[in-house]
Image: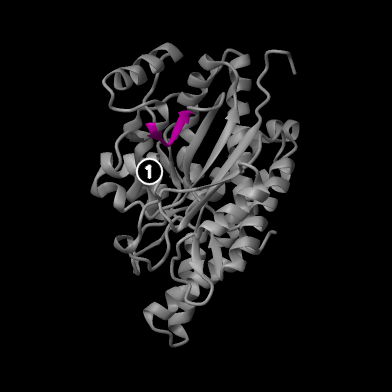
């Protein structure tokens, strides 16, 4: 690697919901829980917008192996302290039967401002996501790679889907979370940007008018981070299992490196209009991995089995350099097992078949999610 080559470091942020260990209803994170987690995790944990949420962020990691060790420690620590308060964390983007109208936001200046600025839209934000940062020092390269990486966002979303239920109903979607999140301003696929200076001018226009304080209020599916020299993928549902999170992080890291590798040969991934990319985004949101995505070069819908095989081969060289071949190939296991959304529906259907009521079946889904949180720890 040359001195100026990116290191492709990664950082992972996850948001969890806290549930009562007995009833499996959502529960408020008590001050003692947050204080204990902060004491043990030294700045890697914080409250989220709602009082029933908690957010963790990994350290800067050079490999997926480092990320695994750090995330395992973070998840284990949150679970350990939550248990002392009769609570359990779940890593799913929506609680299957909770009512957003019964939740309250965290009393912090940032969240109070959000509640004021966004009105009723903010109240419905009973959702959790997972963000992956990839370290790119060059600002211009960040913009160039962001434009190309947008093509792969639907692939990542489809593999991550974990939010089929909302307020006790099966929504028919695999990621209902995006339906809620897309009601916010400055969300969705990032626009094509020609340069870092163009991006900065656009952000500064809103800052100068005092509409936002900085670029952290731009919530695109993929963005240059406001705080770090990274590009930040924000498309994914949070995943119940640690190993699925790591596979998604590895794909994000490897695709980013693959696109950089093309640029070193004076090549690039073809850019498609967001109108077309949004169709794949919708297919991923609606169907997860079950119905395939559009290959715009072939002009046909391709099965996810074929897409994943092609993606693995496309980034194999990068996965070997970044030491994450096993995690990349584990994407096939996600297809074999189904996404979390698929698994949650299977748990509900099995409970109903056994004679459970609809509410009892959804309680079984939450119990399944608490077990999945601990499965890879």
The residue positioned 62% from the left and 34% from the top of the image is: 253
Figure check: 298 above or below 209: below
Residue 217 appears anywhere in the view: yes
Residue 303 appears anywhere in the view: no
Please state, as top left, top right, bottom left or bottom right, where the N terminus lies in the image.
Answer: top right
The residue positioned 68% from the left and 59% from the top of the image is: 376
The residue positioned 51% from the left and 52% from the top of the image is: 54
- Expressed as whole percent of the image width and height from the top left, the position of residue 70 reads 70, 46
Q: Secondary structure at mark 1?
A: helix
- Expressed as whole percent of the image width and height from the top left, the position of residue 42 reads 65, 43
Find disc 1 in the rendering and name its residue.
111
Comparing 312 with 33, the one in front is 33
Residue 339 located left or right of residue 5: left
Comparing 311 with 11, the one in front is 11
> Is residue 313 magenta-colored?
no
Q: Residues within 10 Å of mark 1 (few under 14, many from 20)?
A: some
Q: Quadrant of residue 213?
A: top left
Q: Quadrant of residue 166?
A: bottom left
Residue 48 located left or right of residue 120: right
Q: Magenta region: which residues?
A: 217-224
Comparing 332 with 69, the one in front is 69
- Expressed as whole percent of the image width and height from the top left, the position of residue 105 reads 37, 52
Secondary structure predominantly adopted by residues drawn in magenta: strand
The residue positioned 73% from the left and 14% from the top of the image is: 2
Figure check: 307 above or below 261: below
Figure check: 227 above or below 181: above
- Expressed as whole percent of the image width and height from the top left, the position of residue 280 reads 39, 42
């Amino acid at each position: 690697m040359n001195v100026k080559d990116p290191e492709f470091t990664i950082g992972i942020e996850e948001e969890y919901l806290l549930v009562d260990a007995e009833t499996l209803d959502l529960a408020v994170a008590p001050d003692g829980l947050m204080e204990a987690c902060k004491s043990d995790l030294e700045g890697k944990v914080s409250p989220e917008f709602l009082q029933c949420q908690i957010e963790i962020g990994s350290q800067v990691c050079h490999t997926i192996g480092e990320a695994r060790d750090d995330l395992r420690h973070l998840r284990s620590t949150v679970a350990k302290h939550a248990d002392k308060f009769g609570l359990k964390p779940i890593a799913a983007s929506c609680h299957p039967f909770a009512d957003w109208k019964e939740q309250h936001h965290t009393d912090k200046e940032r969240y109070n401002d959000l509640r004021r600025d966004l009105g009723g839209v903010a109240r419905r934000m009973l959702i959790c996501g997972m963000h992956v940062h990839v370290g790119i020092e060059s600002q211009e390269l960040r913009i160039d790679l962001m434009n190309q990486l947008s093509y792969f966002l639907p692939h990542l979303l489809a593999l991550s889907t974990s939010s089929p239920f909302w307020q006790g109903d099966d929504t028919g979607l695999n990621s209902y979370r995006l339906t809620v999140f897309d009601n916010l301003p400055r969300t969705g696929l990032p626009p094509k940007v020609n340069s870092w200076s163009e991006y900065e001018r656009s952000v500064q226009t809103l800052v100068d008018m005092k509409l936002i304080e900085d670029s952290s209020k731009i919530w695109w599916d993929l963005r240059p981070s406001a705080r770090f020299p990274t590009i930040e993928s924000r498309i994914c549902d949070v995943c119940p299992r640690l190993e699925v999170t790591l596979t998604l992080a590895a794909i994000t890291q490897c695709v980013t490196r693959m696109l950089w590798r093309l640029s070193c040969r004076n090549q690039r991934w073809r850019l498609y209009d967001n109108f077309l990319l949004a169709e794949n985004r919708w297919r991923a949101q609606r169907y997860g991995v079950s119905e395939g995505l559009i290959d715009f070069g072939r002009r046909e819908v391709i099965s996810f089995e074929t897409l994943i095989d092609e993606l693995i081969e496309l980034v194999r060289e990068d996965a070997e350099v970044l030491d994450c071949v096993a995690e990349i190939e584990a994407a096939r296991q996600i297809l074999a097992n189904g996404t979390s959304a698929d698994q949650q529906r299977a748990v509900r259907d099995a409970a109903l078949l056994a004679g459970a009521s609809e509410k009892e079946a959804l309680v079984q889904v939450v119990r399944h999610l608490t077990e999945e949180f601990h499965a890879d720890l």
